[in-house]
Amino acid sequence: MKILGIETSCDETAASIIEVKNKKVKVLSNIVSSQIDIHKKYGGVVPEIAAREHVLDILPVIYEALKKAKINTSITENQPENRSIDAIAVTIGPGLITSLIVGIETAKVLSYAWNIPLVSVNHIEGHIYSNFINTQEDIKFPALILTVSGGHTMLVLMKDHKKIKVIGETRDDAAGEAFDKAAKLMNIGYPGGPAISAEAEKSRVESRESNISLPRPMIKSNNLDFSFSGLKTALRYTLEKDKSWKTRISEYAHEFQQAVIDVLIYKTIKAAEKHSIKTIMLSGGVSANTELRKQLKDKVNSDLPNVNYLQSNLKYTTDNAAMIAMAGYYKAKNKKFITWQKIKVDCNLEL
Ligand code: KG4
Ligand code: ZN
């Protein structure tokens, strides 16, 4: 089965073709056109600009994905037996409404013109399924997925492909959003995650002794939820009190990053123990963070040696369409199609 994935929920225009044969997944193409350089100067994504860029990029990106995957898209091939693509999977939410509709309308037109069935995909589900792309073995359930991105921070319990439930989430800022805001406070660039991670690495390599101490919000709370907005505020007050903070940015970045990592890991292990989890997975843009990847892996291996640990391949951590195609594959396999007349955007879509 071949799936075309389309993703435009925020500021990345992405298209990908994956092929699933005998449980093996091959990513035939994975094209991402990022608008980071455009939004950088505003310190965040400007929805109106993002939408306009998606309109300009969407067809070239899909064309590139088809070409790279050597897919013949002749419109005359619209009989089911001739199909070179079996389904089109598109993100319908959550995300920016003006960005999402560009992907959805394009998917509708292609579905209509090529007579190819459509499946709708939740963006978070896409992040979850990014873990399934490089896994040849069957994933053992129940699985727990820590999904950490710019818009979401969630612990998701997956009993099987049809039973997916959020068991913990952030009450305010997402982890990625906290990284972005902290980087803005220290004026070290956008997006904040990679900027903080690079600064923190300097401090780690120099192994400097530091007396900076930031809180680990909600770490001892009696639930699996998170809160990161207080951490950002604590950083702001600490910077305000320290006249020499500009000479200690790497130390602040290191402590901030470690505070986020400590809470994420603590709650993940707690959730895994509570729900007798067999597989732990890590996904979302923040899962590109090297220290989070390393420390979570080490902790699972030491504290829960019988639990399998998986993390998305780096290229599938931040927004991409291969993960949307992967989630779409499971829907298409279960014949969860939707017609182009019925598919619609839902910018607040829940899991
Ligand atoms: O999944 P994603 O591409 O978009 C959303 O769905 O939000 O995630 C983007 C987020 C941004 O907040 C960015 O700062 C964060 O992921 N991020 C990182 C790293 N790379 C990206 N956070 C921490 N460390 C990183 N290396
Ligand atoms: Zn995302």
Image: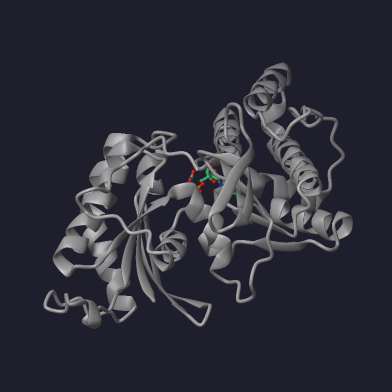
Q: In percent of the image, x 35 and y 39: which residue is there?
A: 346
Q: Quadrant of the N terminus?
A: bottom left
* Residue 318 shows in the view: no
Q: In percent of the image, x 28 and y 76: which residue is there?
A: 67
- Based on the displayed image, in which of its 4 quarters is residue 141 positioned? bottom right
Considering only vertical position in the picture, is 331 above or below 136? Answer: above
| Colour setting | one colour
Image location of residue 227, percent across then percent down: 66, 28
Q: In percent of the image, x 59 and y 44: which residue is there?
A: 165
Q: In percent of the image, x 27 and y 42: which residue is there?
A: 51
Left or right: 283 with respect to 204?
left
Total residue callouts: 0
Image location of residue 91, percent across then percent down: 37, 51
Image location of residue 8, percent across then percent down: 34, 50
Considering only vertical position in the picture, is 184 above or below 16? Answer: above
Considering only vertical position in the picture, is 259 above or below 138? Answer: above
